[in-house]
Image (cartoon, rainbow, N blue to C red):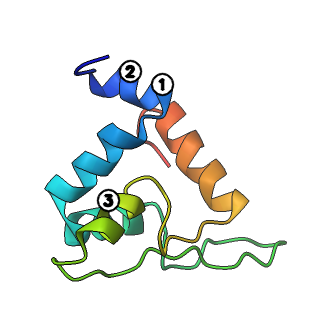
Amino acid sequence: MGNIELEEAFYRSSNVVFGTLAMELGNDALKTTAEKFLFNKDIPSRTLNIDNSRFPSYKKAEIGNIAQSGIGQSGVLASPIEMALVASTIANKGVM
């Protein structure tokens, strides 16, 4: 298939593209971005008890785990509410 643009990678949910990007960005950048989506933090709710989603810290040498975290695997834990929040933020052009 060759190289694909980010929009197509998102549409096709390309593990190769997002795993590679994760390795290029590194764990610190990934974790910082995840925390902007409220990973490792409380999601405010008046009526629901929502478990915190978790985005782990990895050492630079743990490149396989970093790649897997870029596709939501390895030590990443996300609740359905968390992923709905992420999807709605993307659909709302970045406004949470």
Residue 27 placement, left or right of 96: left
Disc 1 + disc 2, Cβ < 8 Å: yes
Q: Which of the 4 image quarters holds residue 53?
A: bottom right
> Residue 61 versus residue 18: which sits nearer the camera?
61
Foreground mark, 2 or 3? 3
Residue 14 placement, left or right of 49: left
Q: Which residue is mark 3?
A: 67
Residue 4 placement, left or right of 39: left
Residue 15, placed above or below residue 65: above
Foreground mark, 3 or 1? 3
Question: Furthest-top residue in view?
Answer: 1
Q: Check disc 1 and report its element: helix, strand or loop.
A: helix
Q: Which residue is mark 1?
A: 11
* Percent position of residue 10, x then y: 43, 31
Which residue is depicted at the point 30% across and 66% down? 64
Which of the two discs, 3 and 1, labels the residue nearer the N terminus? 1
> Residue 88 versus residue 17: which sits nearer the camera?
17
Residue 57, placed above or below residue 85: below
Residue 51, placed above or below residue 11: below
10 Å neighbourhood of mark 2: few (<14), some, or many (≥20)?
few
Q: Which residue is mark 2?
A: 8
Which residue is depicted at the point 25% across and 70% down? 27
Q: Amino acid at mark 1?
A: Tyr
Q: CA distance from mark 3 to mark 1?
A: 19 Å
| Placement of the N terminus among the 4 image quadrants | top left
Q: Check disc 2 and report its element: helix, strand or loop.
A: helix
